[in-house]
């Protein structure tokens, strides 16, 4: 069974731009969660989607948004990029809820210049 | 609020030594889930174990073992006879139902160096 895939793996943007990251969960998994990982703040929960609905949200500004499609694939968008948004963005899929085992993708490394 | 504390920032051991990674959590819920993940240099988090709050049995999987003690809110992870390939960052995580549904909080991680 294929694992969680994330595209692109690396991205370089400049301040003020926007970016869209994509995540394809494991087949049959309906919950997708997004995390931001930085050296200073560690792993922080962004949001969780289930059946195309955002079920939970972390403490991030509205510039961070996401969505989930009917095939469970998910995208997250960051608008008006800031230098502090440089991070590894990790997507995790689970069967039903985030209390099920979450399987992580390789991440997207975003660098904002 | 839920919280996960991994007090050990970095640990360095010599191959074949045993090493224990500590994890202390805080939660008000009676139903919660605890996890350990490994993050090797490649960056991808690898699932190691999931434990629910009603199951305090310790678990052993090969060289890995976990000690869950609700009385001290700890979920410690021991690697026996460590190997160089065990070098990674290890994260403990807690998932519980919050106001908006289940949330998973990760500890800061413990970086383990295993020297040959």
Image: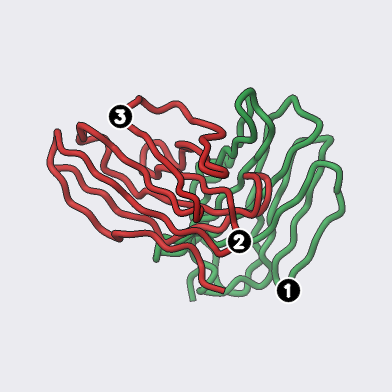
Chain colours: A red, B green
Residue A98: image tag = none
Task: Identify the residue shown where x is 45% and y is 59%.
Answer: A24
Q: Secondary structure at mark 1?
A: loop
Task: Identify the residue shown where x is 30% and y is 29%.
Answer: A63
Circle 2 crowding by C-alpha within 10 Å: few under 14, some 14–19, many from 20: few
Circle 1 crowding by C-alpha within 10 Å: few under 14, some 14–19, many from 20: few
**Relative height, residue A23 to residue B96 (above, below):** below
Task: Identify the residue shown where x is 74% and y is 62%.
Answer: B65
Labels 3 & 2 near each other (Cβ < 8 A): no
Residue B62: image tag = 1
Q: Position of residue A110 (x, y in %)?
A: 26, 49
Q: Chain of mark 2?
A: A
Q: Give whichever of B104, A18 is nearer the camera.
A: A18
Q: What's the CA distance linking mark 1 and mark 3? A: 44 Å
Q: Is residue A87 left or right of residue B105?
A: left
Residue A63: image tag = 3
């Amino acid at each position: 069974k294929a694992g969680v895939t994330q595209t692109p793996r690396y991205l370089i943007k400049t301040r003020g731009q926007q970016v869209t990251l994509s995540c394809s969960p494991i087949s049959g998994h309906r919950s997708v969660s997004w995390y931001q990982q930085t050296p200073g703040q560690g792993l922080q929960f962004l949001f969780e989607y289930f059946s195309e609905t955002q079920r939970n949200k972390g403490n991030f500004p509205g510039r961070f948004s996401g969505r989930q499609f009917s095939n469970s694939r998910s995208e997250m968008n960051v608008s008006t990029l800031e230098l502090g948004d440089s991070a590894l963005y990790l997507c995790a899929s689970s069967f039903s809820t985030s209390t099920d085992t979450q399987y992580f993708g390789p991440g997207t490394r975003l660098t904002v210049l | 609020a839920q919280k996960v504390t991994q007090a050990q920032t970095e640990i360095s051991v010599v191959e074949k030594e045993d090493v224990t990674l500590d994890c202390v959590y805080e939660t008000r819920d009676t139903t919660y889930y605890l996890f350990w993940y490994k993050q090797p240099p490649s960056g991808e988090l690898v699932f190691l174990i999931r434990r629910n709050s009603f199951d305090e049995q310790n678990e052993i999987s090969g060289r890995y073992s976990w000690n869950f003690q609700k009385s001290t809110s700890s979920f410690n992870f021991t690697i026996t006879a460590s190997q160089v390939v065990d070098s990674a960052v290890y994260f403990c995580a807690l998932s519980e139902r919050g106001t908006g549904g289940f949330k998973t909080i990760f500890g800061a991680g413990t970086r383990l160096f295993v020297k040959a």
